[in-house]
Amino acid sequence: MTDTARARKLADRIQVVVAETLQRRIKDPRLGYVTITDARVTGDLREATVFYTVYGDETERESSAAALESAKGILRSEVGKQTGVRFTPTLTFVADALPDNARNIDDLLDKARVSDAAVRTAAAGAAFAGDADPYKSSRDDDEDE
């Protein structure tokens, strides 16, 4: 079994190499504004998963995914050259769900703000249903008499 620190270092290096290669060498017109967000390598250093995001709509995401799949060989050979490991890991590209999750969280927070504002306005003119202090002690009642 390989050291996890070595796998992390290799993953970090793969992330940098893939990002630089996409920026400098890959001239595919289908490739949109792709950002490499993360890379993970298995413990045996045989497989690497590269996470990416694409700025744009669904068609740009699909065309960028196709461009990444077609450039996989060039990217893998570049990773092999620049990392110097005995076996170059196979690359798998996965669209990162982080932007979608962040957008969903923002929508939920907006709904919570609207709900809180509605509760705040309803509570502004509200009065207590009973006494202002429902927890009066029996000593207070005795002293009043």
Image (spheres, grey):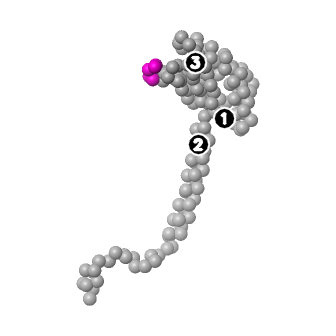
Label 1 is placed on what type of residue?
Answer: Tyr
Instruction: Name the side, left or right, on which 110 lies relative to 43.
Output: right
Q: Which of 49/133 is in front? A: 49
Q: Nearer the viewer, mark 1 or mark 3?
A: 3
Residue 94 lies in quadrant: top right
Residue visible at 53% across and 69% down in the picture: 122
Query: Mark 2 and mark 1: span between their CA atoms?
Result: 15 Å
Q: Secondary structure at mark 3?
A: loop
Q: Nearer the viewer, residue 112 or 2?
A: 2
Vertical position of residue 21 compared to residue 122: above or below: above
Please give the name of the residue rendered at 59% of the width and 42% of the height, measured from the top-left corner.
101
Q: Name the foreground residue: 76 vs 133.
A: 76
Magenta range is 1-5
For the residue labelled by badge 1, is the local secondary structure a helix, a strand or a loop? strand
Q: Which residue is mark 1?
A: 55
Residue 79 x %, y %: 59, 16
Residue at the disc numbered 3: 89
Q: Earlier in the sequence, mark 2 or mark 3?
A: 3
Image spot of residue 48 (x, y percent)? 57, 23
Who's the residue at 72% across and 38% down the image? 58
Residue 30 in sight in this render: yes
Q: Quadrant of residue 77?
A: top right
Above or below, 52 relative to 86: below
Amino acid at dot 2: Asn
The residue labelled by disc 2 is 101
Q: Is residue 20 visible?
A: no
The majority secondary structure of the magenta stretch comes to loop
